[in-house]
Image (cartoon, grey):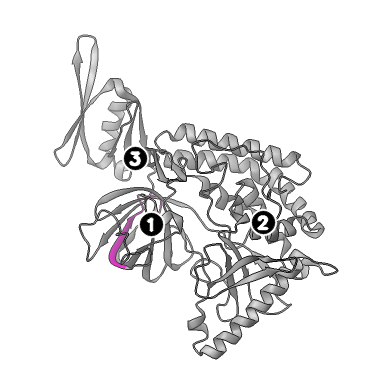
Amino acid sequence: MILFAAAALVATSAMSQNGQLYLFRNDKQFNYYDLKDLTDIKYSGGSLGYTKMAIETSDGTSSSINMSVVDSCVIRQTVIPDIHVRLTDYPDLKDLIKDSQHGKSFVYDATLRMDGNGLYDDLPEQTVEFRGRGNSTWNFAKTPYRFKMAKKTSVCGMAKAKTFALIANYIDPSLMRNAVALWTAQQLGLPYSNHCIPVNVYLNGYYKGAYMMTEKIGVGGGSVDINEETGMLFELDSNYDEDFKFKYRFANNAAKSLPVMVKDPDLTEIKPDESERSEYFSKWQADFTEMADVVVNPGTKKISDYVDLRDAACFVLVNSLACNRELQHPKSLYLYKEGLGSEYLYHFGPVWDFDWAFGYDGSTTIQSHATVLFERDGDYAGMSFMKSLVCNSEFRAVYKEVWNDFYTNIYPRLLDYMAEYAYLIEPTGKRDGLLWPDAYATSYAYAPSAYDRVAKVSELTEWVKKRVEWCNTQSNWGLY
């Protein structure tokens, strides 16, 4: 009763400008109210005490709630940002169209604004280009998005950029897998690691759920800060769907090939002349091939003359922490280099895409923490490339130093970060879970609801603890 009365008092104070009142319930429902909109809370009931409460708001509505279903009442001044998008030519859509004419690359004219809710600065309403994103996730019910502004802007403290991604985290009931991995990459000092900003997304007035806003991976634009005129960002991915791409052939197995694509820059802009562009691309193909040959079979050569081994070690550690075995295919494996020639090194990173990790394998069961990162000997091209790297003695020496630093200095703070992030997004996780109940995203990917986030976060935390301790006892740190 004291808490409910306090809510009414706080609603009248200046501190309530960005605060909210949350009613956590035991009947698979959830109520929340902006404190600035609350006008009154009334109680009613029989001779044995109050049994119902009525919450009235400034728009004249009243909600009647049985007090027996309310587990707790929480008042918070810290509220995550709300992003509001309105499609200019499609004002009645509840989501983006997914047909042959409206794929993920179809651009919608839109307006966008963000209410920072006191946690971050507001983003004033402006015209943007709005579209879908993702590979397999594009076809999930909870759609991932991307927006592009007219000029570079710093959003939520991130570096100035035009384009940002809105990650749906549909198959992750903790809504935290990506955040855990990307925070770890930042703490390790892996250059150009993405940030994680939890947000609520509304499209044409419809609530779409809890999302994670982050930088779009590319050259410049708040991501890989290298000169696009001379540098290159490669993506190794079995989707093999970029315009400029080639297959790296393994000398000891001609049937196996590594899919290598130019993620950025756009070579048609950098080299408008077709013959010049072809020659430039061929030079980069030869340069990458020389590096990959040394990684796969160094012989008398040193990998450290071609690859920044500390960045490689940090990259591998983050993926090992998450047991992200999609590298084996490979999928979403990035490398960048600042220029052609031996004076520059290849850098692994940024790390990306941890939905299918932390024990998730598409089913309702979380897999064991005691699973090596690179298990299959020769099944996949990504596995062959990465296992050659992690078995190298030069790499192992650097990895040992990076692992010890992580285990001693970063790992304890990671657990604190997970607890703080979980607390921050708990209310929005409840709302997301109500909107997106348990379902199969596809026939092979189960998407459990985020409603029971306390249990899901506890499950993730215990898995991470067991994973770290297990890796720390293995002679090869759980890599193979």
Camera-side residue of 91 and 359: 359
Name above or below for residue 363 compared with residue 396: above
Q: Nearer the viewer, mark 2 or mark 3?
A: 2
**Which element is circle 1 on?**
loop
Camera-side residue of 261 and 119: 261
Amino acid on which the number 1 mark rests in the picture: Asp
**Quarter residue 204 falls in:** bottom left
Say the numbered circle drawn on residue 383.
2
Task: Kindly identify the residue that appears in the image at 79 percent across and 58 percent down.
Answer: 392
Q: Main secondary structure of the magenta part?
A: strand
Q: Is the N terminus in the top left, top right, bottom left or bottom right quadrant?
A: top left
* Span highlighted in magenta in the image: 108-120
Q: Dot 3 corresponds to which residue?
A: 431
Q: Earlier in the sequence, mark 2 or mark 1?
A: 1
Amino acid on which the number 3 mark rests in the picture: Arg
Q: Residues within 10 Å of mark 2 (few under 14, many from 20)?
A: many
User: Residue 367 location, x and y as percent?
Assistant: 58, 38
Q: Dot 1 corresponds to which residue?
A: 121
Name above or below for residue 107 compared with residue 76: below
Q: Earlier in the sequence, mark 2 or mark 3?
A: 2
User: Residue 472 location, x and y as percent?
Assistant: 73, 41
Task: Kindly identify the residue that appears in the image at 51 percent across and 90 percent down.
Answer: 273
User: Residue 213 location, x and y as percent?
Assistant: 43, 55
